[in-house]
Each structure stands twice: as C-alpha cells, then as structure tokens.
Amino acid sequence: MNLETNLTKWAIKIGDRLRTRRKEVGLSLTELSRLSGSTASTLSHIERGTRDVKLSTLVALADALRIDLADLLTPQEREAGTDSHSAISGYDLDDD
C-alpha cells in the first residue's frame, strides 16, 4: 500500500472515530469548535477524512471529547481483541 493510500485510510478512520465520539457526548460541530479551538469547517473536513490533521489538533480534540488520544488511533482489530502483531505481513524480524 502506498503512503498516500495509507494516509487516506487513516484519515477516514480517525474522522469516523471523532464523529462517533462527538455524537456520543452530544456535541455539535460548533460546540466542539469552541472547546477545541478548531473551526467547525475544519472539524467537518477532519471528520470526513479530507484534511490532514496535526498532532496538536488531535490532542485538543481528544481533550475536548474526553477521550484518550490512543483510542482515536487504535486499529479496530485491536479494539475487537485480536492481536495486532499477527496481522503484520511482509516483515521477518527474525531473519538477519
């Protein structure tokens, strides 16, 4: 998978998690904007996965949503209880 495809995939996953959490806590984009310091327009782009997000913005959003940043970045497979290391392919770390 090339870098651009991987970045797009992650942007969409993180955006989906942010939107889900925002709705869980009952915030509008405008309310989250006030809490996080990002504009509602920027938040909308982030939630759709169409904007690259700085780490400082993710931290501010996680704080505003009262969620640990790691929960936004944890792959769904790990959340479901599977071992993320078993999913890695293409690398043989034991081979010298």
Image: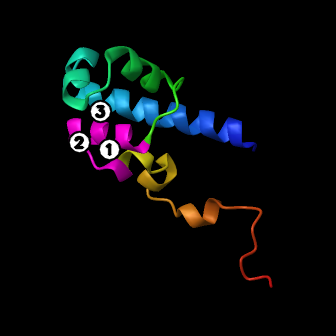
Q: Residues within 10 Å of mark 1 (few under 14, many from 20)?
A: some
Please name the amino acid that badge 3 sits on.
Arg
- The mark found on residue 21 in the picture is 3
Q: In the image, what residue occupies the spot 69% across and 36% down?
A: 5
Q: Is residue 92 above or below residue 43?
A: below
Residue at the spot of label 1: 59
Which element is circle 3 on? helix
Q: Is residue 62 magenta?
A: yes
How much space separates mark 3 and mark 1, taking CA atoms? 14 Å
Marks 2 and 3 sit apart, C-alpha to C-alpha, by 12 Å
Q: Is residue 55 above or below residue 89?
A: above
Magenta part of the chain: 55-70
Decide if residue 90 is on the left or right side of residue 16. Answer: right
Residue closer to the observer: 92 or 43:
43
Q: Looking at numbered disc 1 in the image, what kind of residue is underneath it?
A: Val
Q: Secondary structure at mark 1?
A: helix
Return the x and y of residue 52 as percentages of the image width and height: 52, 32
User: For the point 77% across and 62% down, which residue is it?
Assistant: 90
Q: Earlier in the sequence, mark 2 or mark 3?
A: 3
Query: What residue sits 26% from the left and 44% below the top?
Result: 67
Q: Are marks 2 and 3 in contact (CB under 8 Å)?
A: no
Residue type at the position of mark 2: Asp
Report how many numbered discs are placed on residues in the image. 3
Residue 33 occupies quadrant: top left
Q: Between tags 3 and 1, which lies in front?
A: 1
Is the Cβ of the residue at disc 2 closer than 8 Å to that at disc 1? Answer: yes
The residue that appears at 75% across and 44% down in the rendered structure is: 1
Q: Is residue 89 left or right of residue 68?
A: right
Q: Position of residue 81 (x, y in %)?
A: 44, 58
Q: Could you say where residue 47 lies in the image, as x and y percent from the top left?
A: 43, 25
The foreground one among 51 and 93 is: 51
Q: Is residue 27 left or right of residue 16?
A: left
